[in-house]
Amino acid sequence: MKFVQIIDYKTADFDGMNAAMDKWVEQTKGKRTTGHAVTGRDRSASNHYVDIVEFDSYEDAMKNSHLPETDRMFQEMVSLCDGMPSFTDLDVVREEQLNAATARRFFHEIAVGGNLDAIDEVFAADYVDHDIANEQESETGSDVIRRDVAKWRSAFDFTFELDRQVAEGDDVVLMWTWIGKHKGEFQGIPATGEQCVMTGTTVFRFDSGKIKEGWWQMDLMRLMRQLGAM
């Protein structure tokens, strides 16, 4: 079970806090068990800060806290604080990565399921597409996705297996395996009935909950060999 620690403190010397944290990061290379950390400043009180520190488990958090470097960093932190910082320990009982869920929605609901009406819910109107399968270096507009999905669906009956997904900030990266049966003309090749497999990677950049930009890399040479074109 994931574990989160919230550290609430006040300080007039945030630069000193940053320096202490940078030193701890350098000294604990290969030893720390922290997965992700975020620091926020209170908009209504400029000396009020909150650190949110994530761990894969409570046990990992305890290993991290028992490092001598962590103890030294804590003592330095206390000396820079206005009063003692407070700690809240949380077991994570629900976690949602909304951008990641939206990215999966494209593959399952739109591409495989054929719900083209959902494109405007998932993609920004000024979406920018970078696809090695297209002649232009980039194209703009959600209609690019509508056109490409329609093209692939008319040429193949296919499914996607999402092999790996990583979400960080505004970016979602997906490694996928595409499995399709060639049923219609594709790149000038008449239907062959061949069962084809292709792997690829897609990077989506999100803005305000919608996909703003996409980069597509796929093994088209493998696909064309399977279709007898190479």
Image: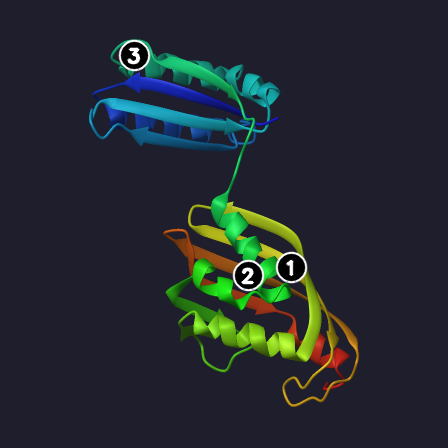
At label 2, the amino acid type is Thr
206 shown above or below 132: above
Q: From the top left corner, tell me how far across and down residue 71 is, in percent.
A: 45, 14
Q: From the top left corner, tell me how far across and down residue 176 is, in percent.
A: 65, 59
Q: Nearer the viewer, residue 117 or 202?
A: 117
Disc 3 versus disc 2: nearer the observer: 2
44 shown above or below 86: below
At label 3, the amino acid type is Ser
Q: Nearer the viewer, residue 103 or 5?
A: 103
The residue to which callout 2 is attached is 202
| Number of numbered discs overlaid on the protein picture | 3
Classify residue 159 by image quadrant.
bottom right
Q: From the top left corner, tell me how far across and down residue 175 is, in percent.
A: 62, 57
The residue to which callout 3 is attached is 79
At label 1, the amino acid type is Trp
Q: CA distance from mark 1 to mark 3?
A: 49 Å
Mark carried by residue 176: 1
192 shown above or below 216: below
